[in-house]
Structure formats: C-alpha cells, structure tokens
Amino acid sequence: MFEIAELGHTLKKSEYNEQIPELRTQLLLLQQQLGTCDFPVIILISGVDGGGKGQVINLLNEWLDARYMETFAFDEPSDEEKERPKYWRYWRSLPPKGRIGIYVGSWYSDPISHRVYGDIDDSQLSVELKHINEMEQLLINDGALIIKCWLHLKKETQKKRLKELEKDPETSWQVTERDKKHLKLYDEFVEIAENVLTTTSTGISPWLVVEGADIRYSSLTVGQHVLHRIRQHIESRNGKSENINGLPFVNINQQSLLDTLDLSLELDKKDYNDQLLHYQGKLNKLVRMAREQKRSTILVFEGWDAAGKGGAIRRTTSAIDARSYRVIQTAAPTDEEAAHHYLWRFWRHIPRAGKVTIYDRSWYGRVLVERVEGFAQEKEWMRSYSEIVNFEEALIEHGILLLKFWLHIDKDEQLERFKAREQISYKKHKITEDDYRNREKWDDYKIAVNEMIARTSTRAVPWLMIEANDKRYARIKILKTVCEKLEAMLEPEK
C-alpha cells in the first residue's frame, strides 16, 4: 500500500510559493469557523524515520492560529503515566470542541514499535489495534474528526536522508542511534506498518499516505488534506453535504501509479509465439503439480474496457485441463446476489483443493464501477477496502495462491480497439453505448483505480500491473507471472 508514496513526488519551489498563501488563508478562515463548531479535530502525523514529520508539524503550527490548537509529542511514558492505564496520557491531552490537537507519537507508536522489536506477537498486535479502533470509533461517535497522515520514504531514500542529516553539523543531532537501528529494521517496520494502516484505515477515518522525500510536496499535500477534511466535516455536521464518510485515500495531486507504466513495451510476433508455447507448456505442468499437491489458485483480472482481459484469460485456460478450472464472468448482480452481502457471490466460487478459479472482473467492482456509477453509497464502498483485504487474507491463510492483475491501456488505444471491434461481425456485440459512456468518466475511474491499488495492494497480495497496449506483451507477462508464482508456491518434484 506504500507504492503510491514511492514514485518520487516533488514540487517546484515556484509552484509551492504560488499555492501556499491561498492554503494558509483558507486554513485560517476555516479554523475561525471551527471555533464555533461542536467537535474537536485530532491530527495524527506518523510515518518512517526521516520522513519529515517534524517539519510538517512545524509548518502546520506556522500556518494555523496557535491560540486555538496544541501539539503533543509522546515518547517513553513518564512514571506518572506508567501508574495509569496506557491511554490515560492520550485522553488527558484531547482537544476540546472547536480546537485542534496535533499528535506526533500517538497511540499507534507503541504497538508498532513493540511489534518491530518483538515485545509482542501478531495476536497481541491485533488486540492493540482492536482497542485503537474502538477508541477512535468512540471519539468519532461523539463528533470528533480524526485526520491520520503517514509520511513514507523508500528504504534507499531514508538511508540517504539520514546520511545527509548526519553529515551537516547543524542537523547531525537529529540522527540518533535509535534512527540507525530502525534503518536496519526497515523491512520489518514497513511490513508491520502496512498491517496497522490496513487494519485501522476505516471509511470515516482513513489514513492518508504521503511521500515524505520532498518537504514542499508533503507539507502542501497534508495541508490540503487537513483543509478538505475539516471543511467536509463541517458541511456534513450542518447537513449540507451527503459526502460524509468518504474521502480520497491519496491526494488527487499525487502521481497515479498508472502513469508510471511504460505502455510502449511490446513483443514481436515470433518472440510471442515462441514464448507462448513455452509458458503454456510450463503452466500446464505446474497446474497438474498444484492439483496433485492440492494447492488452489485464484486469478483475478481487472482492467479497462477492451484492455484484453478476455484474450489473456483464453491464453491461460488453453494451457489447462478443462476439468481443473472455472472462469467466472462477473456482471451486474442478480436479484439473489443483490439480496446478500456483495462478497457472497465470490465466496460461492472459491475453488476446491487443487483447482483454479479465474474471475473476469471481481469483488473490486464495489470500489470501481459501483463507486463511480453511484450504485453503492460512499460509506459502503469506503469500508469495502478493509473488507476486501480481510477477505483476501482469509484466502491466502488457507494456502490459496491469489494473483490479481490490472491490465492497463491508454485512452487512445481503447478507442482504437472499440472501433476495430465494430468492424468485426463476431465482436460487435462487445461494444455497447455504456462502453462509450464510461469513456467520459475515464478520469473518475482512473482516480478510483489508483485508490483501489493504493489501499488493497499488500505485500501478501500485491496488485500485478500489466502494460497492455501491446496484447502480445501483456499475455506473455501474465503467463510468465503465473508460472513464477506457482513455482514459488509448490514443493519441488521428487
């Protein structure tokens, strides 16, 4: 889920200087309005070491009226705090209605740190996160607005940042032995943090993940997010907005993961035919091995209309014994399906041991078409992210290999494929008025896809991004990936 914050986001000084005056003005005006409101604002600033948490908090203090806000930094509990329940020190610092409290080192710090250092195990961490969710829900039920921001850095960037700080005599004091120790534990920290954010990012209190390498970019993004959240909350409390529960997981100004894909990648026909035979033969063998070892596989195909999902699925299934797989075409739910939880119809088709189920579109329709077209209320699709992550965790905990592919093409390529289909008699049926109507919402779908990937791509079940402007390249990449993942899962033949 941190992929969105590892793309190298930066902001030019001129752009920053142009936007900051208006942001500061709007924040101050909104803060004045907040003073008459019946709820407090709690801002949590967390993230990796060197991610710029302190700088962002300093700027928020500079931009906002300090008379109506307070910043709290929590470290090791004092003797007085140790003599009381762990949440006592947080409760006593909560801001009153109409005020803002900014927290660095919040109720998330200790559970993450204790898990990284092995002081608690996964089950104990789960209990801690349950308590956190309960406390936040209690505050939200009373009207509080909780804004949670995570400042992230890639490992290489964090290492470079700490070296730069340590090299400068004026900033060397900022780098402690603890920071150096944490750098060695980076991979463990990020894995645990991903679990924490996924578990505690709820529909009404989501985490914003921001790249922290460039302070201009990170501070502006956090400032805009704070402005948006407070304004939205005031409107919802006044009954002026239906947009109560949902807000973007990532700032709309952040570069889309889709934009990083190289759609010029292609494969000539000869290479394609050679590799197709190779990987189909390999896949056939691996699927037979999986059947013998009773290991199930689920393949999820999502992507733009005309991105080539059907063609990729056919090249996959043609390598597998028809008795070993099922392809589930997901369309609008039937009356029976609509009468159940939206995941019900997907649970029904989970494969038996050793079998393969392929979903041509899937449960992600809840956060894509149902979101964009308004078939699901915002509070429904917002909570679906965590529901989907939990659903997928249940599958992999059972030993199922779950692979999910997003086939990406650009808008021009899609139009060319639409027009080509209209010229082929046996493909005309694939093009409908809805396909062209959906193109008009391309930007809305792009935002939804980017958010979907950011919130549901985990280390255990990452999204596999397929550059699909060239169908041959896409098909081979998919077949190769399936073979590699199956090989890694299966026990070697004796």
Image (spheres, rainbow, N blue to C red):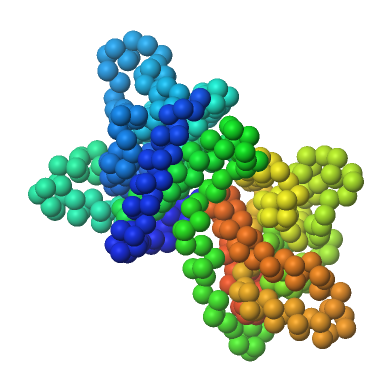
Q: In the image shown, does 319 or 190 lie closer to the viewer?
A: 190
Image coords of residue 184 (percent x, y): 30, 46
For this orientation, the residue located farthest to the left is 169
Q: In the image shown, does 234 or 323 lie closer to the viewer?
A: 234
Image coords of residue 208 (percent x, y): 47, 45
Image check: 85 left or right of 453? left
How many numbered marks does the figure carry? 0
Q: In the image shown, does 344 or 67 lie closer to the viewer?
A: 67
Image coords of residue 425 (percent x, y): 88, 83
Image check: 269 left or right of 98? right
Residue name at image x 73 percent, y 55 percent: 373
Residue 52 appearing in the image = yes
Q: Quadrant of residue 235?
A: top right
Image check: 87 left or right of 356? left
Image coords of residue 174 (percent x, y): 19, 42
Q: Quadrant of residue 116?
A: top left
> Looking at the picture, does residue 116 appear above or below residue 325?
above
For this orientation, the residue located farthest to the top is 83
Residue name at image x 88 percent, y 50 percent: 334
> Looking at the picture, does residue 106 appear above or below residue 489?
above
Residue name at image x 58 percent, y 24 percent: 141
Residue name at image x 84 percent, y 61 percent: 323
Residue 108 appearing in the image = no
Query: Quarter holding the C terminus?
Result: bottom right
